[in-house]
Amino acid sequence: MFPAFAFAQTPLHPLDALRTEEYWTVYDVVQASGHLDDDTHYISILLHEPAKDAVLNWKSGQAISREADVILLRKNVTIEARVDIVARKLESWKEVPGAQAPFFESEILGQSDLVLRDSRVKEALAKRGIKDLTMVECAVSPVGFFAFPEQENHRIGFADCDLMNGVYHGWGRSVSGLTIEFDYTEKKVLQVIDEGGTPEPTGPINFEEAPEVPRAGTKPGFIEQPAGPSFEVKDGEVTWQNWRFRFRLDSRSGIVLNLVGVNDGGRYRSVMYEGMVSELFVPYMDATRGWSTRVFVDNGEFYPGGILQSMREGLDCPSNAVYFDGLSTNEKGAPVVRPRQACLFEKFDGDVAWRHGDDNGVWGRPARSLVLRSAALIGNYDYLFDWRFQQDGTIVVAAGATGIIETRAVAAESVAGAHGGDGVENYGHLVAQNLLGVNHDHFFSYRLDLDVDGQDNSFTVHRLVQKKLPAGSPRKTIWVAESAMPANEHDARMDIHLEQPSMWLFVNPNVKGPLGHPTGYEIMPGVTAATLLDPDDGAQKAGAFSAHQLWVTPYRDNERFAGGTYPVSSKGTDGLAVWTKENRKIENTDIVAWYTLGFHHVPRQEDWPVMPTMWHEFQIRPFDFFPQNPVQNLPHVP
Ligand SMILES: [Cu+2]
């Protein structure tokens, strides 16, 4: 329909996503390496980004270096290979001691028969009156932290079983109080943890049967762009209004934005070299033995096959959206096309760029924005990820959580029947009869490699502090902004306190605006959360990036994943909290911002049986980057 939006078959830029032919080259090189045997399986093939300097110095038409990082699994041994795609050559092949490769969905869902064959499992189910096992499905989930010695060098998971009679999905139908420890490496049940059962909830959980008729009184509404969108995608670069950026679709990180900059009066100015979701940490807050292992470091544990899901037209994006397909790999290491993994659309539905009213009338301009959106599915949860580009130079970064909450069966049919105190009812909120929505957190780590007007930036904090005024002043107190430039990583760990507000600026000390201010961009938090877990809790060590809302590090090309490269059974020995222990210098150098967007989730009745989308966001906005309001002279039509 719009050939301009199709990506080329061969890469046109060093940061382009791997193409079909390139995946096959990687496959051929690995197959021919002589290192494979029948027990070696492909886990993932990801673009290995070229060195940043090489990308920044690259000119269109020059040769492009292309490399891929391959993760393979041989029984319990994780192997890393690097392939030079252009030279069709294996550059390296090494085993990674202690690392546990992430999981394919089939590995998680494919153990059900083995689990159900175990006599202890059969007995526990029989005790609950479940004798026909045909409709029982048991999924074995990995653990996002190291808790048990058997996790050492073994792939260990914990299963719970769902009763599928009368439903088409098992969420909300799990067999209560039954958890099965499973060794994926040895393909056997290690132990059956039976904490006692309660009857299975039977309330409605199917949500697709509603008739597709409009809600009464709803009149049709249309979004039309008869002349097509006003953005352009050329050779993988998106241009819209004053914005310019590239993006690729990555199996592990989803949308990876690159080379984001603005055209400022004909001059290109860089804002962000790269922006992406680095990791996602979801610990549950149920202390029972069977539930205490439900701690997920989602991207790093579950990305094989691709974290993004195909979007559905008419649902995920408005009718004026353009969709982008992506590629991932399957369990054989072959590329697979994933249709509609991202969409791009303009929004012009009544936002105000600015206004002012006076005796002569109302003055102002309507705004439009450009949204780049993707949707991820991770187990029970769906996430929408937005990068919303505004005309005023702001990027609003938003994450929407929807899908199905995790529940457990409880004896109580209403709060009147709940025992309270130390009972399991204490670990969540009753969302339906006999069904407890279990409390949990969601923490997203965004890796934002800001390059404001160039690579060398500094981090500046404006702290707003109370100032006492001398006697005789009509006021006793005001607040003033005190600026500081943290010199190292430790001083740049930022926590949000309403009583100690601060503003977080990334400035270029070498580029000054007309008033002498360094040009800058601010990371402005929205509603967010900090972890309530103890730093010595094994779960918290795996998701240690959740301890602060902002971290700043010097740029390192191998520091990409805030929870470490291998979060399965993680001991917390890799990741943001570990790298920053060095307390490296971050002044007037290439620095990276890591923003943690988090929320505590106490489920409510309205979150069942499927959860209304809940958005959280933050902003990356210019601060003294432009000499004045950049949207003052927008046209009067949005
Ligand atoms: Cu939640």
Image: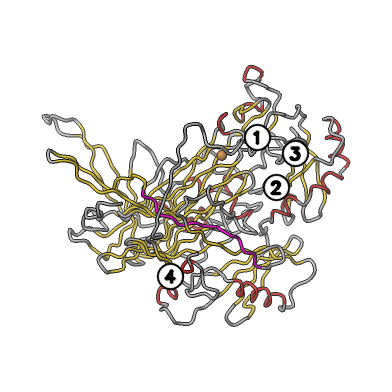
Residue 337 within the magenta-colored segment of the rendering: yes
Q: Which of the 4 image quadrants contains residue 103?
A: bottom right
Q: Nearer the viewer, mark 1 or mark 4?
A: 4
Amino acid type of disc 4? Lys
Question: Is residue 600 found inside the magenta-colored segment of the image?
Answer: no
For the residues labelled 1 and 3, the Cα–Cα distance comes to 12 Å
**Element assignment for label 3:** strand
User: Does the CB distance between marks 4 and 3 fall below 8 Å?
Assistant: no
Residue designated by label 4: 234
- Read off the residue under disc 1: 407
- Mark 2: amino acid: Ser
Badge 2: residue crowd in 10 Å (few <14, some 14–19, many ≥20): many
Q: Residues within 10 Å of mark 4 (few under 14, many from 20)?
A: some
Q: Calculate the distance from the C-alpha at mark 2 to the C-alpha at mark 4.
A: 42 Å
Going from N to C along the chain, the mark reached first, 4 or 3, is 3
Classify residue 158 as left or right of residue 241.
Answer: right
How packed mark 3 is, by other alpha carbons closer than 10 Å (few <14, some 14-19, many 20 or more), is many
